[in-house]
Amino acid sequence: MANIIDDLNWRGLIKDYSDENKMKELLDTPQTIYCGFDPSAGSLHIGNFVMISILMRLQQAGHRIIAVVGGATGMIGDPSGKSKERNLLDKDTAKKNTESIRNQLSKFLDLEDPKKGILINNYDWLSKISLLDYLRDYAKYFNVNYMINKDIVKSRLEAGISLAEFSYMTLQSIDFLHLHQSEKCNIQIGGSDQWGNLTAGLELIRKLEPEARCEIMTANLITRSDGKKFGKSEDGALFLDSKLTSPYKLYQFFINQSDEDSVKYLKVFTFLSKEEITEIEKEHLANLGQRIAQKRLAYEVTKEIHGEEKANEAIAMSECLFKNDFSSLKEDQVEELFPKNMIINMDKELPLADLLVETKAAQSKREAREFIKNGAILINGNQEKDENKVFGAKNGLFNKYLILRRGKKNYYLIKY
């Protein structure tokens, strides 16, 4: 079987290995590999998709994967990357979020055949360990000085860290040990902020089973070319749940990336081959104005997460603005085309010139007349030259929306 490490490194996906050469040796033969997912929210986001994509690549390379939803650890709270203690999840919320994440992961990973992959909840084994068993069988192997020197703990000492959060890495370590013993899992992967937790688990296994051949690796935190954290849009996190982040919004986020980032993200987020990406990059650099890499990136990511039909729909919606043809839009797609601050609620009919002033598309009636006279005003894709023509809900798409364009780039969505 082909060793996947070279491809993961080329894509810039891996930050740290416990031992890269030993990891390569392990991956020369089929392995069982696990990654954990925190159910602190009801949906995973685009940052989580980096880890999901690594699992998908590993599975496609012939390895068996285990996706662990942290139904138990999610109730404690991971201090990694947090400046203060998070609110603890109650059992019902953790259970609800866990089920939601389970359904999402099932879309991307082959979990039909247990020989290829399984999805499990760490509540199933951690909840059965009594306090005395935990202290006697596991906690005694963790040196407090060793734990304090972990970055995930050290960064929180000044602000304060509870015993519950301090113990989090011991619970995640138990996960790795449990899966090693019950599922012959020898590899754990996680985000770069999980390095302390992953190494703690590796150390626990080595103390209890010195002959075990286990290794870990972490994924790079994906950043933009300006150094800023990746994955936030104007509306916040980009969720994998289409009800929270629509396919169109996801498409728009990726199509608006910089030239440098778009090529970088083709490697990270898509399953195009090295040869295909190299060719896209070459064509993109030769025709910068055409945004070839951005378009392919946006399409591939949207297709991977939401399917080909939704990806094509997102392209069609994007072209509506470019072509000024909104006839193919569905009612629930109209508002998606515009940021919330561009949607203007209206409850009265107005002549065109007054409508421009009311929506602040013109500063005065005189300026409004100039725009209209010069042919700069379009309503729902049609040029309007009659300043006295009255517009209201009856003129709107679905008797509700007027898409007003002034000039080439100034849009206003009027909602009745």
Image (cartoon, grey):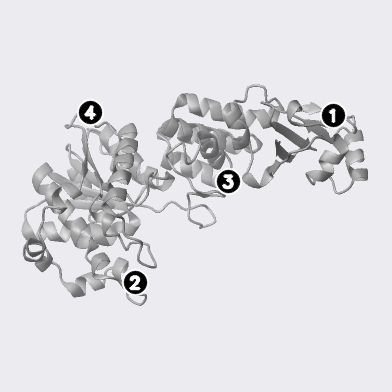
Tag 1 and tag 2, C-beta contact below 8 Å: no
Q: For the residue marked with disc 2, what is the amino acid?
A: Arg
Tell which of 54 and 139 is nearer to you: 139
Circle 2 Cα neighbour tier, 10 Å, few/some/many (<14 / 14–19 / ≥20): many
Label 2, label 4: how far apart the Cα atoms are: 41 Å
- Where disc 1 sits, the SS reads loop
Residue 361 visible in rendering: no
Q: Which residue is mark 3?
A: 258
Q: Which residue is mark 4?
A: 112
Instruction: State left or right for residue 152 relative to residue 414.
Output: left
Circle 3 Cα neighbour tier, 10 Å, few/some/many (<14 / 14–19 / ≥20): some
- Where disc 3 sits, the SS reads loop
* In the image, farthest residue toward the bottom: 158
Question: Any mark on residue 156, and which?
Answer: 2
| Relative to 304, residue 42 above or below | below
Q: Specify the quadrant of the image occupied by residue 293.
A: top right
Instruction: State left or right for residue 39 relative to residue 188.
Output: right
Tag 4 and tag 3, C-beta contact below 8 Å: no
Label 1, label 2: how far apart the Cα atoms are: 61 Å
Label 1, label 3: how far apart the Cα atoms are: 35 Å
Q: Nearer the N terminus, badge 1 or badge 2?
A: 2
Q: For the residue marked with disc 4, what is the amino acid?
A: Glu
